[in-house]
Image (cartoon, coloured by chain):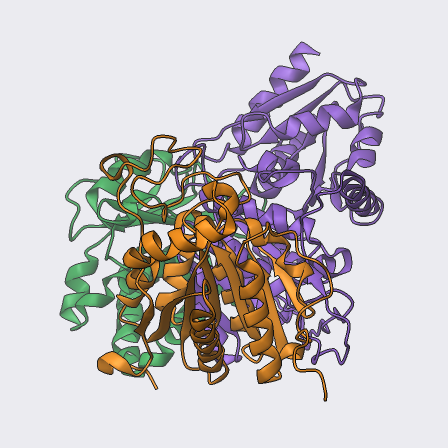
Amino acid sequence: MGKTFKKPEALSDQPTHYCPGCTHGIIHRLVAEVIDELGIRGSTVGIAPVGCAVLAYNYFTFDFQEAAHGRAPAMATGIKRVRPDLTVFTYQGDGDLASIGMGEIIHAANRGEKFTTIFVNNAVYGMTGGQMAPTTMPGQRTTTSPLGRKPLDVGMPVKMAELLAALETPSYIARQTVIKPKYVKKAKKSIKKAFEYQLEGRCFSLVEVVSTCPTNWGMTPVDALKWTEDTLLPYYKLGEYKTPTNGGNDAK
Amino acid sequence: MQNEVMFAGFGGQGIMLMGKILAHAAMEQGLEVAWIPSYGPEMRGGTAYCTVVVNERPIGSPIIRNPRHLVAMNRPSLEKFAPMVKTGGVILINSSLIDIGAGRTDVDALNVPVNEIAAEIGAAKAANIVALAAFVSRSHIVDFELMREAVKNEFAAKAKFIPLNMKAVDRGAEIAQA
Amino acid sequence: MGKVLMKGNEAIAEAAIRAGCLNYFAYPITPQSEVAEYLAKRMPEVDGVFLQGESEVAVGYMIFGASACGARVMTTSSSPGVSLMGEAISYITAAQCPAVFVNIMRGGPGLGGILPSQADYFQATKGGGHGDYRLLVMAPASVQEAVEMMMEAFPLAEKYRNPVMLVGDGLIGQMMEPVEFPDNLSIPATNKDAWATNGMDTRKSDKRNLVKTLYLNPEELNAHNLLLKAKYERMKQEAVKYEPYNLDSAYQVLIVSYGTMSRVCKTAIDMLKDEGIEVGMVRPQTLFPFPEQAIFEAAACESCKVALSVEMSMGQMIEDVERCIKGRLPVKWHGKCGGDVPTPEEVIDAVKRLIAEY
């Protein structure tokens, strides 16, 4: 009997620096599996964000660039415009993409840049130490909202998938999670679709992955999974928000 | 010797184009030349002007406080720039729109009703070409025939306008020599 | 090819294409928008890339991404826009990627004005972005020189794997002068396989490339900065360019001036010569590396009593001039920075006042 479970070729041997219970590892693996399955490791360039995944470049085995905070979509645009034959993806957190990089992601999506974004939303700044993010839930305590996020003061959490799906330009926009095996399967399917649309030269694609941060939420990994399901998922609803064929305005 | 001319008027009078055609002619003549536009807020309405500097030798400062010559297409530009012209220069006054003189006795003031002339020949838009031809004919700042060629080249893509512009060139020269 | 009459902005755009740069990203800003307008038409004709980004911040990173995957790439902007690109410039320099930035300077600080200025001297030569980095900074004084410098900029950027910045005051962009482009110029693409993230398949390698600027280990970061420093020292040895003017005379005053301002100074020097007053000038063509040795030596001239930094900024370059002269001469400043270019007559007055004083 051969091996039934092995590490994807696109993933390196290096142990990750992520905290116990963090879902970055699963998401990295899904991206690596998709890249292996599509056979595109030799023509892929990944872009690491600023945030917990800043060191993502250590965990993959293909070309990588590291961006400044929020600017990964602009870098991906630069690469994709001069080398449309390369497969390009950005891997960004919610502080990076939904706060400082809001302008870059919206304009890249609106231009229909043919790259893929993996957007990991865990409702908090991770690497900088648990500060409030644009995606932090009402009442959620963080180091910069010690009494809980007050919507009257700082507004409601930003729903990026819905916001980007509202653009007229055709795109693939989905929100998934990886907190249970049944969700993991769907998330992988979405990630694969996102890359496939890119390979077809079809559209911008983004998969938001609702994720956990037990460390900064101050929870055990198990409680974090439960909180995600009970609190985040009712607000950040899963599903495909836009596919390039709906709405009747697919450029193809 | 260095020569400078300032073209000035309202936006829309073809001021920049006059300078550009003159600069082309100077280049064809083998002279050093620089065309310096005004690109401040006065680009929209108000006074538009550009300066053309020609020289046999490389041009030093492209910034000219006192040009040798002035082509004034409207009254505000005459009032503003006439006092700056060097002694002995030509001041072309568009007498269609300007009812005053240069206010100088040490310059060669030339009154040309460029709008009327252009209208007479059926080319109201070519008033700037009438002025340019009259000015070049009077000042000899560049070779007149090279200027004529430069006008032709400017309209190369719109060949149907060339005959009227050639008429404008001829009439401009006639009146400058009258 | 014969001479053509072109605006500086358009000539810069055409020169980039002829230097083999077929990738351009930019955001409009006066007084250099003609570069983008020209290339919006011209790039499609040569199968090049033209993209108007959503901001200078984004454009900076489009340049970074394109450059990091090995493309020859450039952008153009003006002072406030270059401030916004400062972040990306710091990253690109840290990541050792080649790229060309053009700054057609306007008056500052803040929104300032749109008329000619040289007030970004510090920004270009001393930073603008964060961290220990340098740009190779070129400063043309005519449209023709802008064209020639553009052609040198790309190979220099690739040689040093460092951004090159071309700075011109607004007049360099707006003025029309006859220019001549070299025939059949070809600047072959350099092989960037050793470092560019151009895809493993592209370079037929199973070794991946990584373009990064993060060095969490202090020893590694220090080593990285020493490597960059060594590169800047090499630029100082190899890449300095300047033009001496009237330095074979017994000059009483030494002027240091660059760009359009230096042309005004040349006219002033010629006019002073007619009056029997000799003034010499060093015109830096590169602002970094700065012509340190040339200025030091020019200041040693026995007849020279005082040096004058003439700049369209409020005394920025003078700090470098003082540094080069090492106290041999008093160093004075003359300039203006509102958009009016000082005239030859103003420079002459300044020189005469100095002669009377020293």
Residue B29's image quarter?
A: bottom right
Query: Which lettered chain is shown in green?
Result: B
Q: Position of residue C331 (x, y in %)?
A: 70, 20
- Where A80 falls versus C133 (above or below)? below
Q: Position of residue C46 (x, y in %)?
A: 53, 79
At horizontal 84% and vertical 31% (from top left) the residue drawn is C297
B102 relative to A201 in the view: left or right = left
Which part of the image, by quadrant, shows the N terminus of chain A? bottom right
Q: Position of residue B105 (x, y in %)?
A: 31, 35
Along the viewing direction, whichever of A200 and A80 lies nearer the viewer: A200
Along the viewing direction, whichever of C33 and C81 lies nearer the viewer: C81
A94 relative to C60 in the view: left or right = left
Can residue B32 be seen at all in this image of the molecule? yes
Which hue is chain C drawn in? purple
B118 relative to C77 in the view: left or right = left
Q: Where is residue B31 in the image (x, y as percent from the top left)?
A: 56, 59
Which hue is chain A drawn in? orange
Residue C190's image quarter?
A: bottom right
At horizontal 70% and vertical 74% (from top left) the residue drawn is C186
- Where A65 falls versus A70 (above or below)? below
Along the viewing direction, whichever of C9 and B51 lies nearer the viewer: C9
Along the viewing direction, whichever of C196 and A155 lies nearer the viewer: A155
